[in-house]
Image (tube, rainbow, N blue to C red):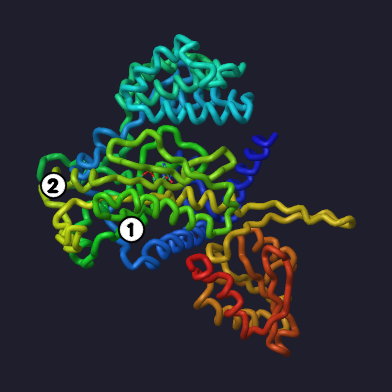
Amino acid sequence: MAQKNNDEQFKNVISHAKEYGFVFQSSEIYDGLSAVYDYGQLGAELKNNIKTYWWKAMVQMHENIVGIDSAIFMHPKVWKASGHVDGFNDPMIDNKDSKKRYRADQLLENKIDELYSELANFSAENKAGFETFQQEILGLSDEGQAAWIPGFKDEETILDNAKYPFVDEASWRFVRKGLALEVEMNLALKSENLAQLKDLIVNYKVICPISKTSNWTDVRQFNLMFSTQFGAMAEGSDEVYLRPETAQGIFVNFLNVQKSGRMKIPFGIAQIGKAFRNEVIARQFIMRMREFEQMEMQFFVRPGEDKKWFEYWKEARLKWHKALGTNPEKYRYHDHVKLAHYANAATDIEFEFPFGFKEVEGIHSRTDFDLKQHQEFSGKKMQYFDNDLNEDGKPYGNYIPYVIETSIGLDRMFLLTMINAFEEQDLSTEDKQDSRTLLRLHPALAPYKVAIFPLTKKDGLPEKAREIMDELKFDFNCIYEEKDAIGKRYRRQDAVGTPFCITVDHQSLEDQTVTIRHRDSMEQERIAIADLAGVIGKATSWKALLA
Ligand code: GAP
């Protein structure tokens, strides 16, 4: 039932986004382009406000972080150095009956989730015991896991009942299979053993959700980068890529920014920009797109201080999310047990979307991997000279800095914001059925800050309303509306998240006051026109969010 409600709520958010000009399918009149979306008149405003919130928090509130705007096209060697040409692949498999293509790892992850769902039948104590055990196993080295798997799969007795009481649970055989599959899948993915991935799909009886058969092709690697042709390049190759992440534009400009900005470690470089990935499985609206935007920051630190800064950014970024007033229970960290080869720590900030907890932002401790790679591939030194003194009173000297990255998807943040703000309220009384749809956006993010309505279209009220708007529009995004009854105009503004509506009536002409209506409480009060800017300014100020 809860699932159905969640699905329904998600569908309602999607149709609301279209109806009110937030998000449209790209090229809709040509039946759309899959996993590509356009932001409409209000979506563009909301998106800009989210960008501003991020930029202010990251760049303007930190003296040691600067922002850049690097090009989407980069030298093809950048992607060789970063590992994207050779390693930015998804393992794909086709079902021969339905002709549908899937990511092999996602099919397996769904199977693992299905098997782990049996944990719901465990006692709370045994569930916790299993989870500790699971972390122990997943924390083993690859060799340790590979050695552990055969006994675990074949002999239930390998587990000591006294040490692991959960093996007595009736659902244990499913959960056990889930853990075995998780380990086997991780090992196969790490070693890029595609035949093994296929074997797991077959052996664990994974079926296609459409055809319900297990008639699978082999698993093949599919590179996610889009390529296109450029003018002739020195090396004779004219293939360039649309960047799959904005981060590399920061790494290749590390020296330029450090030198021109006289930046001292620790310092950060931030940017917001488009990224492109040829996602094979594109789904859940703007959650997984082929063209999307990232807001990334690379923080360059002294080797050895990376763990400390990783913890700092982990906490700082969650605080940024929660400041928007989102229910804190909707957020959680997902610390990576298995790390990418270049990382020594990584966590995701996950949000509970209607379709479950999913990653919105990644915080990665990337060591000196990227700068080292660029040093090797470009032949240019990527070093920093640190003249601060170490414990022995000597300068730290030359080194390649370590990097902590914070990387958030702007479109995912947009979706989160819409989902979190969307509310359908029943306002019925004994005498009358009534309801409203509300976007309870933080006022600083709201596309319009204030709507200005003349009560009627005559008696000089429109002129007075326009006069107020002409004064406020320099500081606030305003909308003027004179069509329809006031109640209907209020409802329309509630639906797009406008925090204030101002009504100009005959009394306004006499005493220079208006009624101001508050979106969330629907309360109205009479205030002097001269006080409007102060009231609206206070509620919509970035200071409230950033202080
Ligand atoms: N530079 C690191 C990096 O790109 P990532 O985890 O691949 O890391 C970071 O991406 C963030 O970008 C994700 O947390 C997500 O919010 C967003 N993102 C990634 N792929 C996306 C896609 N196809 N559509 C929308 N957002 C995406």
Residue 27 seen in this snapshot: no
Lower position in the chain sequence, tag 2 or tag 1 = 1
In-front residue for pair 528/309: 309
Relative to residue 545, is residue 276 drawn left or right?
A: left
Q: How far is disc 2 from disc 1 in space, using C-alphas? A: 22 Å
Relative to residue 5, is residue 339 drawn left or right?
A: left
Residue 532 seen in this snapshot: yes
Q: Position of residue 32 (x, y in %)?
A: 48, 42
Q: Position of residue 514 (x, y in %)?
A: 70, 80
Which residue type does callout 2 highlight? Ser
> Circle 1: is it few (<14), some (14-19), or many (20+) Cα within 10 Å?
many
Relative to residue 501, is residue 545 drawn left or right?
A: left
Q: Residue at x 64, y 79 (%)?
A: 465
Q: Position of residue 454 (x, y in %)?
A: 69, 76
Residue that mark 1 sits on? 270
Instruction: Kindly state the secondary structure of the residue where label 1 is placed.
Output: strand
Relative to residue 255, is residue 221 drawn left or right?
A: right
